[in-house]
Image: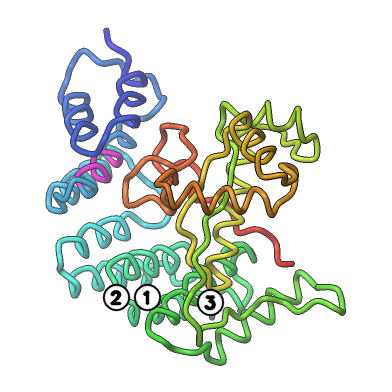
Amino acid sequence: MRSGTEIFRRAMRADPERRVALLEAAVAAEDIAWDGAPPVHDVWEELADAYASAGHPAMAIRAMERAVELGWNGRPDHRVKLAEFTLLAGQVSAAGALLEGARAEDPDELWLYNAAGLMYADNALHAEAISWLAQGIAVALDGSGSDDILEQLVELRAESLFQLGQRPDALQLTAVDRLNALSPTEQDQQPVWPPTLAHPKTSIVLAYFPADQLAQAIARWPELDEPSWEAYARQLEGTAKRLLAAGANVRGFAPIHVNRYVAACAEEGVDPASAESRAMHATRAAAAGDCVAWPPGRGERCWCGSGRTYRRCCADAPPAAFV
């Protein structure tokens, strides 16, 4: 009997169309052992995401409905997932009705507002994103949920405000004050919130050491020490989110291959240990096309190279702390 877990892993490493084919075959087969890792309803959910990534929203809706029939009970409510696929199909009113239904049942569910803001922003419906995120921020300020989710709501709303050329309103500034109060700065430092929305975004590429280079980099520069590649990748993800919230256009990550990088620095007479040298390397690498785009699109594999989808990997890393 074939292992459902192994087929699932193969699917997660495939492109969207191949992922659809593998997952379709998996859920249709009778000789597969679903041994609890992952549950079969999660496979149907992944199939729904794969359909959406491949541009088949109607099939995504049907697959998600099947996941619910089999016991999928994720957070937020399944209607949020259905709304995401319905919106992808261009049915804006129907998607809104699904979200309203979920909100009526649980108005304090902050992840509902976060997901609604994300899906509307992904479809360039920034006015709707601003509205839903405002409602979530208001709930969070009243004391529901953690400050991490408040931070995400504020950042997402700042991005949509920027896209529409709008300045932060009173609600946004109140939330910013709350976040700055949680992370006080030195007196001679200025908090970077709110983002400067009146000016074009600065384009940024972040340098990073790929998984097969990190140990060598740490051996050469011990101050880089990280407990694991996963922790390092999540730190990078948080940095990118922090810069995005501050108004920067984060294009992606440029890999540093230690030996080549050190040799190039020696030729130029610069210190390879300095942040400035790494930043210059990142700029040049990106100009040459050696850059991993960020953030990944819907259903795409994570930029870190884990093979998992971005949503199931680094996407939930919180933004880096305020400085």
Q: Nearer the viewer, residue 299 or 45?
A: 299
Direction from residue 7 to residue 241 in the image, left or right:
right
Percent coordinates x, y for residue 185 in the rendering: 81, 73
Q: Residues within 10 Å of mark 3 (few under 14, many from 20)?
A: many
Please give the range of residues in magenta.
45-51
Residue at 62% over, 38% down: 264
Please say if the residues under marks 1 and 2 sit with CB atoms less than 8 Å apart: yes
Q: Residues within 10 Å of mark 1 (few under 14, many from 20)?
A: many
Percent coordinates x, y for residue 163 in the rendering: 39, 79
Percent coordinates x, y for residue 178 in the rendering: 69, 78
Direction from residue 10 to residue 91 in the image, left or right:
left
Main SS category, magenta section: helix
Mark 1 residue element: helix
Residue 125: numbered disc: 2
Q: Earlier in the sequence, mark 2 or mark 3?
A: 2
Q: Which residue is mark 3?
A: 137
Q: Which residue is mark 1?
A: 129
Q: Nearer the viewer, mark 2 or mark 3?
A: 2
Please say if the residues under marks 1 and 3 sit with CB atoms less than 8 Å apart: no
Q: CA distance from mark 1 to mark 2?
A: 6 Å
Q: Is residue 299 above or below residue 25?
A: below
**Which residue type does callout 1 highlight?**
Ala
Residue at 86% over, 73% down: 186
Mark 2 residue element: loop
Q: Quadrant of the C terminus?
A: bottom right
Residue at 39% over, 81% down: 131
